[in-house]
Image (cartoon, helix red, strand yellow):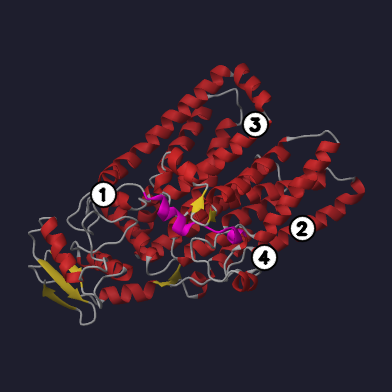
Amino acid sequence: MIAWAAAACVAFRSFVLSSFDLISGDRGDGRLIVYLHEHLYNALLGREQFLSPPFFYPQRDILGLSDAFLLDALPYSAFRILGFDPFLSFQLWATVLSLGCFLCSLTIAIRYLKLRPCFAICASILLTFPNNLIFKVNVGHIQFFSVYYIPCILLIALWGLEDFPRLSRWSLMRIAIAAALFGLLFSTGYYTAWMFSVTAAIALCTAGVIYRRDLFVMITNNYIATRRLVAVATISFVFGLIPFMLIYAPTLALVHGRSFRDFISFAPFPKDVIDVGEWNMVWGWLVQRLIGDGGPERTLAVAPGMTVIFIILVYRLRVVARDSKRDNWQLTFATASLAVWSVSWLMTTRIGTFSLFWLPYHLIPGATAIRAGGRLQLFVNMWVVASLVLMLQYWIDTSAPLNRRRNTLLSGAILAFCLIEQINLMPARLSRSHELEWLSAVPKPPVECQVFVVNVSGRTANDLDENDAMWISWQVGKPTINGNSGWIPPGWRLEDPSIDYRDAVQQWISASHLDQVVCVYDRASTRWTRF
């Protein structure tokens, strides 16, 4: 608990040092995601329709235009019921979720990977507070706190598999719970569920090739148990996907998947294999000189020092094991993790206007929804961390007694360096007090106003204008024509530079057959006027 608290204070230091005012995120995507959590809370209370948040009005069934955050709904609502404001509720839930991730990772490391407690604690910190995740949430994409669910789901699954092939009723129940939660993860953070599935598939295929004969014998000898296990997991996973289908089926009727050109525009370049961002405490100066600002979708590499050490260890220990004709599951796990790291870069890297992601884009279900392939590194980090610590302990355990103390000290130094290497100095930028202060100054609209838009300073609106309108909608209890999400409904052109903002509003009113009174809210003068 001391280790987690210390690491959390470093990772969330802006929140702590600002007297709990600055939270992870920004005024763009950060505010949008907190707003969507607040919508779920209001839907649970019966104040709003679950699938139809009150923006892009009167378009219905638009929750699936973005992540739906389903697993967050109840715990977030619990903080809201306790009286915390939306922004504080979200940050408190993210902090509690990080504790859950840390403890589950610690349990997996000790119970299943058989790591020493000190090594397990280091691995859990490296997994819970990596550089790329802290950068990603502070830049605004706080939906990736959903990464914290993965160790929790894995722990339940491993608990259910402990006694395989002997499957008790409780074992099958744990497998069912884990599979259902993973299905629900698709309705919480689609990128998180889909991309972790890709990394797991790469690792399992690699291990399957290495253990192909043993795997065939195991399945043959335990056919009934394997069939029961697969049947329970499949049924539960499909059950967990039901909300996903209910939420996203209407979305698929409105919009189609992204084009491959969208993916290419955000794909990382080969040089981004070391791009940990300018805010990284160890490598930031070097990245600034060599790469510069790669943007929020390319600055996601797994820490390069840790990666190099991991690759060297895997190669060296595999050579030693081959010479001694000794092989074991630790080396197989590390080899599978190395395959995850290498294949992830080969698959997502952009060369000119081409990327090997073209193959999964056309072959793997759900790949057409992926716009930023670099986000895969958020999940590759898990495999690298687990394998690095596992290899360090394996190195110690298999070394000669005279070298064991030296190797232990070197391993401690390596882990200390890796912990320092993860520190990201980027501050949080979303101020609770500022948001609540300007919202409290919004007057109630006239009684005749039933729908509204906000004024804009130029020809078109931007995401900050849209987010302002959505939060004003929350404050005054009126729907808004403005809106912000991963996709936009067909015909909605308020951010289209080829048309004037007021003309775009008028076109939407006409196209959607909106016959309610529309008002305009001027944010500078805090006045309501009829559109």
In the rendering, which numbered label is found on residue 209?
3
**Magenta-drawn stretch contains 259:** yes
Residues at discs 3 and 4 in contact (Cβ within 8 Å): no
**Among numbered discs 1 and 2, the one appearing first in the sequence:** 1
Residue 50 is labelled as 1
- Name the dominant secondary structure of the magenta segment: helix
Which numbered disc, 1 or 4, marks the residue that appears first in the sequence? 1
Disc 2 to disc 4, C-alpha distance: 12 Å
- Which residue lies under the disc numbered 2? 412
x and y, in percent, of residue 240 in the image: 39, 37
Residue ranking furthest to the bottom: 525
Which residue is farthest right?
Answer: 402
**Residue type indicated by callout 2:** Gly
User: Residue 349: where, in percent of width, then height?
Assistant: 55, 53
Disc 1 to disc 4: CB gap under 8 Å: no
**Which of the pair 180/295 is nearer the observer?**
295
In this view, the residue in front, 103 or 330, is 330
Mark 2 closeness class: few <14, some 14–19, many ≥20 residues within 10 Å: some
Q: Residue 238 in magenta?
A: no
Which stretch appears magenta?
258-273
Q: Which of labels 3 and 1 is toward the front?
A: 3
Residue drawn at the location 50% of the way across and 22% of the way down: 228
The residues tagged by marks 3 and 1 sit, at their Cα atoms, a distance apart of 45 Å
Spot occupied by residue 339 in the image (x, y as percentages of width and height): 64, 43
Name the residue carrying label 4.
420
Q: Residues within 10 Å of mark 4 (few under 14, many from 20)?
A: some
Q: Is disc 1 placed on a helix, strand or loop?
A: loop
- Disc with the residue nearer the chain's start (3 vs 4): 3
Q: Is residue 155 visible?
A: no
Where residue 352 sits: x, y (%)? 52, 57
2 or 3: tag closer to the N-terminus: 3
